[in-house]
Image: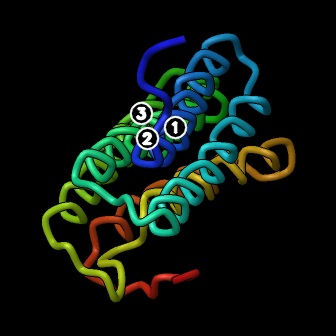
């Protein structure tokens, strides 16, 4: 069979696209009210996101394309999906009123701060540390909290989501682990 086989340059992008696929599936599962499996998909995205960078460095095939694809995937998997999951599972069921709209606002701010965090990361090109908490941590932590949604009160999610949004756009130096 003729054609272009998968090259080493493509392998990290397969992990990145898997990250995006898991984020997409998380959104579909939220729509189907399957919150636990949606959280698991986001946690699966965390795994794929950690592997794409490791594989790219191991194969020495890092590229600008891969960096941009990774950021787009991260926005869906760790910005939009956790925000919608948290809103739909925890905040939307609250009685219509002020708190529910505050929850919607904080969920939107979380996703927007994640987008700003990723844009800043792409522009700075700092290799020694992160500036602000990485969106992967913030989204993964929200997904992890979802596994405790029957134990934790609703306001914990509101406070944590607002705090994580702030930390993503903060200028705190965060050590890079696993380098």
- Identified at 37% across, 42% down, the residue is 75
Question: Is 36 in front, or is 101?
Answer: 36
Within 10 angstroms of label 1, few (less than 14), some, or many (20 or more) residues?
some
The reply to whether residue 159 is visible in this rendering is: no
Foreground mark, 3 or 1, reads 1
Q: Identify the disc placed on residue 104.
A: 3
Foreground mark, 2 or 1, reads 2
The residue wearing badge 1 is 14
Locate residue 39: give its quadrant: top right
Are discs 3 and 2 less than 8 Å apart at CB?
no
Please say if 98 is above or below 34.
Answer: below
Question: Is 144 in front, or is 98?
Answer: 144
Within 10 angstroms of label 2, few (less than 14), some, or many (20 or more) residues?
few
Task: State which quarter of the image contains the N terminus.
Answer: top right
Q: Identify the disc placed on residue 10.
A: 2
Label 2, secondary structure: give it.
Answer: helix
Label 1, secondary structure: give it.
Answer: helix
Within 10 angstroms of label 3, few (less than 14), some, or many (20 or more) residues?
many
Question: Residue 117: x and y, percent?
Answer: 28, 60
Q: Is residue 37 left or right of residue 74?
A: right
Foreground mark, 3 or 2, reads 2
């Amino acid at each position: 069979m003729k054609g272009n086989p998968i090259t080493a340059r493509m392998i990290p992008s397969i992990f990145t696209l898997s990250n995006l696929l898991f984020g997409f599936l998380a959104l579909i599962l939220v729509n189907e009210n399957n919150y636990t499996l949606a959280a698991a998909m986001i946690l699966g995205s965390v795994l794929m996101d950690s592997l794409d960078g490791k594989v790219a460095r191991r194969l020495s095939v890092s590229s600008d394309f891969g960096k941009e694809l990774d950021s787009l995937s991260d926005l869906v998997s760790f910005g939009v999906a956790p925000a919608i999951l948290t809103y739909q599972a925890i905040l939307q069921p609250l009685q219509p009123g002020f708190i529910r709209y505050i929850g919607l606002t904080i969920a939107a701010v979380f996703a927007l701060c994640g987008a700003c965090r990723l844009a800043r990361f792409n522009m700075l090109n700092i290799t020694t540390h992160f500036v602000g908490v990485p969106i992967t941590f913030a989204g993964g932590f929200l997904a992890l909290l979802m596994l405790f949604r029957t134990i934790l009160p609703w306001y914990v999610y509101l406070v944590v989501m607002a705090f994580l949004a702030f930390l993503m756009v903060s200028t705190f130096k965060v050590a890079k682990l696993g380098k």
